[in-house]
Structure formats: C-alpha cells, structure tokens
Image (cartoon, rainbow, N blue to C red):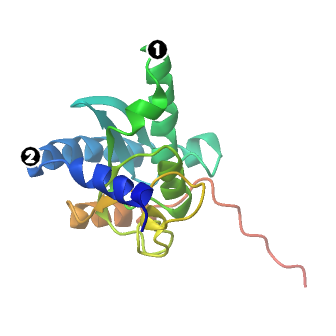
Amino acid sequence: MGGAEESKSASAESFCPSDAEIQKWMGAAFDVAKDALENGEVPVGCLMVYKDEVVAKGRNEVNETKNATRHAELVALDQLRDWCRRNDLDVTHVCKQTALYVTVEPCIMCAAALCLFNIPVVVYGCRNERFGGCGSVLEVSSAHLPQTGTTFKCVSGHRAEEAVEMLKTFYKQENPNAPKPKTRKE
C-alpha cells in the first residue's frame, strides 16, 4: 500500500458518524423509504448529510420514471450536485465530507457511483444479497481499482430487520408495471 491508499483509508476512518447520528439519520432514511413504498416503488430511501445538514435525499423512482437507473442513491447524488450548484460549493469538496445513510446496501452500480463521487462513509440497513456492491455480491466499496474514485467505509446492519420487512411488503403486492403474460398459440 502506498501513501495515497493509506490517506484514502485514513479519511474514511476519521469520518465515521456516531451511534446517535446513525440512529437519527437512519430514522429519516426510513421515512423516505416508506414514501417510496407508498408510491409503488421498491422501498429504498437515503439521505446525504454534510456538516450535520441533510443536503440531499432520494428514494427509488424506477417505476415512476420507467428508468432502471433511478435508484435512491443516484437520485440523491443528483440532488447533491444541484445543492452544491445553488450554494456555490465545490461538489468534490462537499462529497469528501458527506455521509450517505440508506436503508438497503447500495447495488453495484450505486456503490461505483459513490466511489466516483468520493463519498467516504455509507451507513446501510439490510444486505442486498442479489445486487449488493458493499460486499454481499461484490466489494466495490473497498476495491482498489485504478481511476474509480476512492473507497468508502461501510457501516451495516442498522435496522436491518425493518428494511427486510419493508422489502417483503413491496414484493407481496402486484407490480402494475410488469409485462402482461402472453398466451401461446397452439
């Protein structure tokens, strides 16, 4: 490990939210996830917190927009960029001091985006056994790949059971956007 890798790890380690902060912000992330569920979306909600202020929040918007990339984290990253623009702040600088709180482990796509934006810490509820990018499927969060941003610290398991129950509730209902089954011609 060289100096650059050590400084990446050191910045993530020095930027770790307290238990009280985790409880506070995860509660708010679950409120956003409940909104997603009430609006027919997979119940994933997240907040981006910079200097103890929520600067962005996102929930899945995949069904609403019919765009498979509109995951909660990417919606929040778009809001963060807009917030920085409105406040005349450098998004790169802000991201290095921003924590993401999300109800479900980010998927591989979202974890890669978080690396590219240099988010130092991600706190999440339950694991994402099918698409998880923080170790459940692929360890994007700590893969020292060239030119892919910085690694980030994962703090997992906060209110995991509640997150799983919300997901079960969603998957029990019918998806109005699912393709209609076609009957075969004999």
Query: Is residue 40 in view?
Result: no
Amino acid carrying mark 1 in the image: Arg
Q: Which mark is residue 150?
A: none
Residue at 78 percent of width and 70 percent of height: 182
In this view, the residue farthest toward the right is 186
Position of 89 relative to 149 (above/below): above
Query: Is residue 61 in view?
Result: yes
Quarter holding the C terminus? bottom right
Residue at 29 percent of width and 54 percent of height: 10
Question: Which type of secondary structure does the marked residue at label 1 adopt?
Answer: helix
* Residue located beneath label 1 in the image: 86
Residue 9 falls in image quadrant: bottom left
- Is 67 in front, or is 91? 91
Image coords of residue 18 (percent x, y): 12, 48
Question: Which type of secondary structure does the marked residue at label 2 adopt?
Answer: helix
- Is 84 in front, or is 11? 11
Q: State how far apart marks 2 and 1 are (Cα).
A: 29 Å
Sooner in the amino-acid sequence: mark 2 or mark 1: 2
- Is 98 in front, or is 151? 151
* Residue located beneath label 2 in the image: 20
Image coords of residue 17 (percent x, y): 18, 47
Q: Residues within 10 Å of mark 1 (few under 14, many from 20)?
A: few
Q: Is residue 107 left or right of residue 29?
A: right
Position of 3 relative to 100 (above/below): below
In this view, the residue farthest toward the front is 3
Image coords of residue 85 (percent x, y): 50, 18
